Image: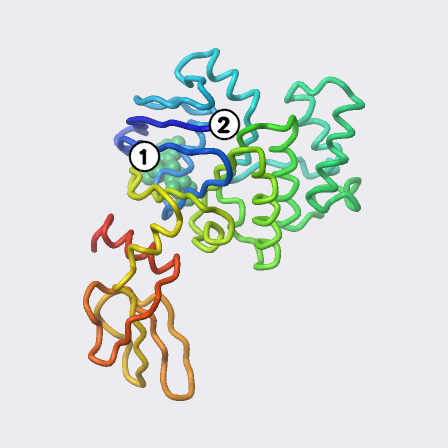
Amino acid sequence: MDITITGLRRKFGRVEALRGVDLTVPGGMFGLLGTNGAGKTTLMRILAGVLPPTSGRVVVGGNDLATRAGRLAVQRRLGYLPQDLGLYPDLSAHEFLDYIGLLKGLDDDTARRRQIGELLDMVGLADVARRKLKGFSGGMRRRVGIAQALLGDPALVVVDEPTAGLDPEERIRFRTLLAGIAGHRTVLLSTHIVEDVAQTCQEAAVMAKGTVVFTGPVSGIVERAQGATWEVVTQGPPPSTGVVVSAVGRAGGTHYRVVSATKPDPAAVAVQPSLEEGYVALMREAVPG
Ligand SMILES: Nc1ncnc2c1ncn2[C@@H]1O[C@H](COP(=O)(O)OP(=O)(O)OP(=O)(O)O)[C@@H](O)[C@H]1O
């Protein structure tokens, strides 16, 4: 299900969370990167139909969200994992999914339970399906979250910051899971963790201060730091020009990687940028200072 967003604005009092967003999301897995407060959650909530925009247009799979019929059609085919999904601590994973399934209108008991069993299997929680959610780790909760989003086999899955706060192993597991479900769906992954997008998406958009400052193949973000990424090895203070992206202490001195339009030090050597460095360069262009 492709998404076309045109001139989307949303105000909260005097705060303009979205300032004219234009974005096209094709099928497959799509990353939405941006710093805290960039407007990602606001955009996701509008897509999920839980928040109306102030102005602008959103069309999802041919359905216009401005109409009631359009919103209903999208909601029927949408799975949403919000940033803080409330789980009922005294329900088991199975009971919780059963409850959400009923709310989603999956009335056939046998079919619903079969689907829940399959999803619990897929997210690796089949063995703990009868355990109460209050005993679940952060990663397990997130996996219950994605299972509830997938109930009803939605064509569009919207996931807001799903890996924040997870340990590296759980993060890798979770994003592998997401990439796996994107085969015949559109999965929109909002995150401020560049590595999550690097590992799962071919296409992405970057938001800053309520607008989209980049959209296209992920390699296009890397290109933004081409010719502007340097390594400086020194036993002295860190380079003062540009943005230091990493610093590794070694026997001969500290190895700094720096994003800077100009050579940050006479001894600096140009290096191949990573996605994170591309993202830093892009944000410096979009939000100078
Ligand atoms: N319900 C609201 N009432 C008032 N201001 C809001 C509301 N929701 C969002 N905002 C403001 O709109 C801006 C964008 O917030 P939003 O949550 O969409 O950003 P974000 O990119 O998702 O960041 P985060 O990752 O921190 O959630 C912020 O300045 C935020 O304070």
Residue shown at the point (77%, 24%) measured from the top left: 111
Q: Position of residue 220 (x, y in %)?
A: 34, 50
Mark 2: which secondary structure?
Answer: loop
Q: Residue at label 1?
A: 17
Vertical order, 60 against 241 (above or below): above
Q: In the drawing, does residue 256 fall left or right of residue 185?
A: left
| Quadrant housing residue 100 | top right
Where is residue 122? Give x, y as percent. Answer: 70, 42
Check the image and report above or below for 183 versus 198: above
Nearest the viewer among 289 and 177 is: 177
In front of the other: 213 or 243? 213
Question: What separation in Å lies between label 1 and label 2 (alpha carbons)?
Answer: 25 Å
Q: Amino acid at mark 1?
A: Ala
Query: Quick check: which quadrant has ligand 1?
Result: top left
- Colour mode? rainbow
Q: Amino acid at mark 2?
A: Met
Sequence order check: which comes first, mark 1 or mark 2?
A: 2
Name the residue at 24% across, 48% down.
Answer: 286
- At numbered mark 1, what does the secondary structure look like: helix, strand or loop? strand
144 vs 255, left or right, is right
Q: Nearer the viewer, mark 1 or mark 2?
A: 2
State the mark number for residue 1: 2
Point 44% across, 43% down: residue: 31
Disc assigned to residue 193: none
Quadrant (top left/top right/bottom left/bottom right) for the C terminus: bottom left
Q: Are marks 1 and 2 in contact (CB under 8 Å)?
A: no
Determine if the C-beta at disc 1 is less than 8 A from ligand 1: yes
In the image, 165 versus 114, the foreground residue is: 114
Q: Residues within 10 Å of mark 2 (few under 14, many from 20)?
A: many
Where residue 34 appears, x then y in whole percent?
37, 46
| Picture residue at 62% right of the left edge, 50% below the top | 139
